Image (cartoon, grey):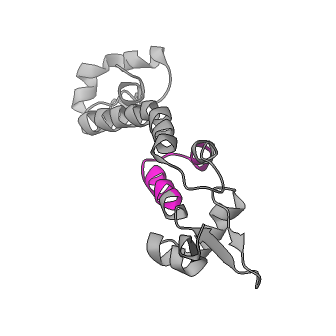
Amino acid sequence: MTRDDLLPIGGLARRTGLAVSAIRFYEEKGLLRAFRTSGNQRRFMRSDIRRLSFILIAQKLGLGLSEIEEQLGTLPQGRTPNQRDWQKISLSMRRAIDAKIALLTRTRNQLDQCIGCGCLSLKKCQLYNKEDKLAAGGTGPRLVLTAK
C-alpha cells in the first residue's frame, strides 16, 4: 500500500459527498476501517470510496443498516475488494433487490386503485374487495404487500 492509496477523512468526505460525521459513524459500525498516522489522524484506503458508495446505493434501495453491515462484513479488510468479492455481494443481494423491485412495481400499479386495506373508500374497492373479502387473508394492504 502506498501513500497515494490512503485518503484523509476530509478527502474521503469530499469524494463521496458524505459528512465527516457520517464516515465516523460508519467506521464505528465497522463498515470501514481507518489507519492512524503517527499524529493519530485517520487515513482511509481509496477503496473505501466504493464501500461508502455501496452504502449510499443500498440505503437508497431501502436496505437497512443491518443488511448493509451483513453484506460488507463479507468483504476483506486490509485489502481492496476485487471484482469477485463484489460479485459475491451482488449475487447475495440480487434476490432482495428483485423482491423490492416487484413491490415497487405492484405499488406503482395498484396505488391509485384498491390496495386491499379494507377501507372500502374508493369505488374500485367495491369491485376488487367487495365487503372486504381480502381481510380473510390477513391484515394490511393485501393487494400490494402479498406476492401475486
104 vs 68, left or right, is left
**Above or below, 136 relative to 145:** above
Quadrant of residue 109 within the rendered picture: top left
Work out which quarter of the rendered image holds the C terminus and state it.
Answer: top left
Secondary structure mainly formed by the magenta segment: helix
- Where is residue 121? Give x, y as percent: 31, 34
Specify whether residue 114 is painted magenta: no
29 vs 106, left or right, is right
Question: How many numbered marks have been drawn onto this rendered protein structure?
Answer: 0
Question: What residue span does the magenta drawing correspond to?
Answer: 51-68
Q: Residue at x 41, y 23 (%)?
A: 146
Specify whether residue 64 is painted magenta: yes
**Above or below, 133 relative to 108:** above
Q: Residue at x 58, y 71 (%)?
A: 2
**Above or below, 32 relative to 96:** below
Q: Residue at x 34, y 38 (%)?
A: 104
Work out which quarter of the rendered image holds the N terminus and state it.
Answer: bottom right
